[in-house]
Structures are given as structure tokens and as C-alpha cells.
Image: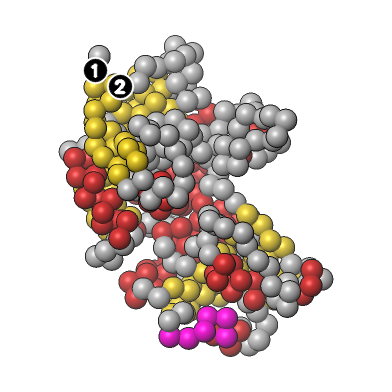
Amino acid sequence: MVMMKAAVFVEPGRIVLDDKPIPDVGPLDALLRVTTTTICGTDIHILKGEYPVRRGLTIGHEPVGIIEKLGSAVTGYREGQRVIAGAITPSGHSHACLAGCHSQDGVGTAHGWKPMGGWKFGNSIDGCQAEYLLVPDAMANLAPVPDGLSDEEVLMCPDIMSTGFAGAERGNIRIGDTVAVFAQGPIGLCATAGAKLKGATTIIGVDTVPARLEMARRMGADHVVDFHSVDPVEEIMRLTGGRGVDVAIEALGTQATFEAALRVLRPGGTLSSLGVYSGDLRIPLGPFAAGLGDHSIVTSLCPGGKERMRRLMAVVASSRVDLKPLVTHRFTLDQIETAYELFGHQRDGVLKVAITPF
């Protein structure tokens, strides 16, 4: 049995590097040799036991790699080809997929489908913080990397770029809109970049970490608000002359940021929620105008599939957005536990880490 190194969830508080068998390849699968991956905030929730996964699962859902082996029924690809796969790997034939909700791909039951059912890597199947990754439904999910793009240039596509851009897309941002983005972590920064690409002409980034506020400007923010220095709601209303914003994107997942995003909306504005919440949300009566304010509240889960990945890499290749600066630290797979310690404690100005086999 041929073995590989993999970052494995042992118990809450412990993700360790261990040996696991290289997966067998089924007819519709592809085996990738992982060349670069990263750690997501969701992986930290798994590490802390805040999101339950089975013990022994390989973690990680943001792969860049080379096709090592193709399943017998897979066509249109070749071994040795550089590819990415989205964090969300839809089958293409579930009820959710056929209804156009590929991110919610899952097994339908009498009780509905599992939320985030399309997220399989590091959730319901082994993920990509390993030397090899088995990609299901390869023909629906593998996207060839264009010549000339490095691993780090496309590393954000599988998850945070797709998620952040989805926040702007679902918010239905129009040319000339004013947009506020609450939290400028990696996903919030991608939402800021997505808002600019969608045509927003006034973008307000909210955070408190100086390096993130500066990065927000690089990603397209026209104004930045330090919520430790001023009340962000009051400051955004001042910046908009009391009008409020057309779209507020919530990219953290807390009651405070959700409520603040609602409070800065203009009448008929849209709150686009990207945060993963750990408890019930309360909608305050006043900002919600007792349900009569024509507001929209929309949510998004990272869109996946090969066409989504193709489109995102086309944006990168066009130089309309440069997300390489989000990679602030680099580790090898043997250093994965050190990488988790750094990323989990948000030390040394970390935004995203790149993890390579050697």
C-alpha cells in the first residue's frame, strides 16, 4: 500500500501530519498531486471543534495540482495537466444542481438536503492538505490552469475569491453604487475587489487591523473605517451624507457586524451575507423598518464547479485583480502544524498561507 502525508483531524485542538494511503481512483474521479494549497478560516473552526467532522479526516479544500491519474470514464483531460478544483465540488445532477444551486449539491431526503452539501473536501471526504487529493465528478470540477499563471496567482480561486465575489454578485451591485464591506479578512478583501469589478464607485472597507485596512485600499476601497476608532455605522452614514449604502456585505459572521450592515442600508438596499454564524441572529426592529423597508437579505455559499473556476482564472489572467499579495506566509507540508498555529492565532500580519509539498 502506497502512503502519503496528510494533515488529519484527530480531535478538537489537534490537526496533525500523518501517513494515509493514496486514494484509489474510481471511474469518474481524478487523482491530483497537490502542488499548492492553503488554510481557510473554516479549517480553524474544525480545529477548534466548532464545526464537526469525523476523526481521521484529511482537512483542506483549496487545491492547485497536477493530474496524476484519471478515472476510466473521465474524458477531456490528460495526466500531467495543471488544474484547480473548487472548494465546492457539485455533481451536476442532484436536485440542487438541476435547480441552479450548485453550491447546495447534496443528497435529497424527506428532510431536505444538508446545508453546504456541495462542500465535500475536508468536510465529508478527504481534503487537500496532503500530497494527493481524490477529486470526485472530475469532469464537472477540474479546471485547467492557463499557461503563465503561477500556483499562487490562482490559489484564491477555489474558495475565498469565489466566495468574496459571490457576495458582490448576490448583492446585485450596479455601476455607481455605494458599497460597505464589513471585515477585511481574505474573504472581505475579495468582496471589496469584487465590488469594484461590479462597478461600485464608492467602496467603504471596515476593519481595525492597519495592514488589512491598507490592503483594502489596494483591493479597491475608496474609504476605510477603523471600528475601534469610530462608530462604523455613524461614520458610514457620514460618508454617504446620511443616504446609506446600496449594498452592505457582511464577511465576518457575528451579530454585531450583521446588525451594523443592516443599519447602514438605504431604503430598499441589500445586505449580502457571507459570514458563517455560530448562533441565532437577531434582526433589530428599527433598521429593518419593521419589515417594511423593501430591504433584501441574501446569503451565499462559495460557488464551485469548473465553469466558475474558469471564469475566476480568466479575471486573474486579465490582470483586473491581483490577489497574490494576500499570500503573506509560506510553509511546506511538513510544517503544517506550525502553519495552523500561526494562522489560527492571526500572528505576524497573516492573511493567507501557501503550503507546498516541499
Inter-mark Cα distance, 2 to 1? 6 Å
Q: Residue at x 33, y 71 (%)?
A: 211
**Quadrant in which residue 131 is drawn:** top left
Q: Residues within 10 Å of mark 1 (few under 14, many from 20)?
A: few
State yes or no: discs 2 and 1 in contact (Cβ < 8 Å).
yes
User: Mark 2 = which residue?
Assistant: 22
Q: Is residue 47 left or right of residue 20?
A: right
- Secondary structure of the residue carrying tag 1 is loop
Q: Position of residue 133 (x, y in %)?
A: 36, 29
Front residue of this view, candidates 269 and 287: 287
Reply above or below: 244 against 124: below
Task: Classify mark 2: helix, strand or loop.
Answer: loop
The region drawn magenta spans: 229-234
Instruction: Kindly identify the amino acid type of the residue bearing the numbered disc 2.
Output: Ile
Q: Is residue 9 above or below residue 13?
A: above
Residue linked to disc 1: 2
